[in-house]
Amino acid sequence: MSEDLKQRLEQFLIAQNQATEIAPITPDASTREYFRVFWNEIPAIACVYPFNDLCHGQFAACLDVTNVFSNAGLPVAHIYASDEAKQIIVHEDFGDRILRDVLLKSNAAEREKLINQAIALIAKIQAATPLAFEMNSVASRLKFDEEKLLWELNFFKTHYFETYRQTKLSAKDEEALENEFTALARELEKHAKVLCHRDFHAANLMIDNAGKLQIIDHQDARIGAASYDLVSLLLDRVLETPDADWLTEKKRFFLGKREKLGLEPIEPENFNREFDLMTVQRCLKAIGTFSFQSVTRGKTHFVQYIEPMFRIVRQAAKNLEKFPNLQKIISIELDH
């Protein structure tokens, strides 16, 4: 916890004639810091943004995307107050029940019900795409284009090999991966047509006191592929490769929810291919994040997810019959 951020929050609360009782909440991979406070005697969450380049624009983006999601009827926290100069947002408190933790304690039927509810939310987010453009949201002006997708793939390459493994790829492997990553990014850009949460996994969904799913950490929303958030939900931070039949059922359920909302139908075969392409990109990006977080911020609990997600990426590449160099490099890493 940064004392500077806490002091800034204390000054803000005093200026607003609010109680200054502050309890830090440990963030996951966030550069922001969260505190449980009281706002008009009601429990609330205060998000405080550091004054640095990493968080530049996130304050405004959070307000913007929350406004879009709220207007679309999506379950996001009501904002009680905000201060641009101090980079502080105070919003509704959903409690402490994170979906990821609840899933671990639930039986099979309960898990399936909760996962399907989360999948239905992804379809509703995509249905809000026209509204995002109508409101000229920052999310409508950002896109998972070739440049962004390639940047994330290179982030993986740098932080997995150099930061985490403390090694460098050969010039031959560097060139081979660069060519495959460029081809992957170019193909995925063609699918970037709908609003995406961008980090839609079970640690960014909460269950409130009424038992309803609530969306958090949505400030980075942008336009991307229909499969993006589904890949994140089903494959991010897993310890075992999900059963292929289970994944097929979840994809079918998702496409059905999209159609019920009037979204453009997607042929299952085409969606399977897009899903595998997105799996390669999204999971490699996640491995890069886990590598960076474990080394530079000491969050070593992320390391356990690296091997399983490499196996998932390799299987997706095999399904596609593409990216032989990536498959070879992953196999070497898994045998290391």
Image (cartoon, rainbow, N blue to C red):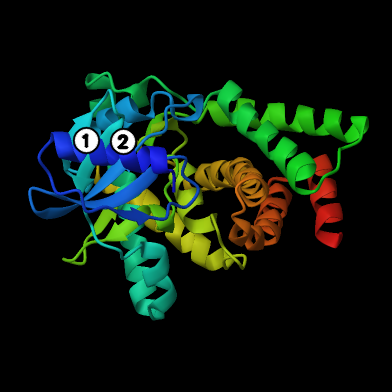
Q: Quadrant of residue 136?
A: top left
Compared with residue 294, is residue 173 higher up or lower down, i.e. above or below?
A: above
Counting from the top left corner in percent of width and height, residue 271 is at 50, 44
Q: Quadrant of residue 157?
A: top right
Q: Residue 12, labelled with which disc?
A: 1
Reading the image, the residue beneath label 2 is 8
The answer to the question of whether label 1 and label 2 lie on touching residues, with beta carbons closer than 8 A, is yes
Type of the residue with mark 2: Arg
Counting from the top left corner in percent of width and height, residue 152 is at 61, 33
Counting from the top left corner in percent of width and height, residue 148 is at 56, 26
Type of the residue with mark 1: Phe
Residue 72 shows up from this direction:
no
Residue 134 appears left or right of 3:
left
Looking at the image, which residue is at 38% across and 52% down?
204
Looking at the image, which residue is at 26% across and 31% down?
63
Counting from the top left corner in percent of width and height, residue 336 is at 86, 59
Looking at the image, which residue is at 69% across and 45% down?
320
Residue 58 shows up from this direction:
yes
In this view, the residue in front, 155 or 269, is 155
Q: What is the C-alpha distance between the residues marked 1 and 2? A: 6 Å
In this view, the residue in front, 132 or 25, is 25
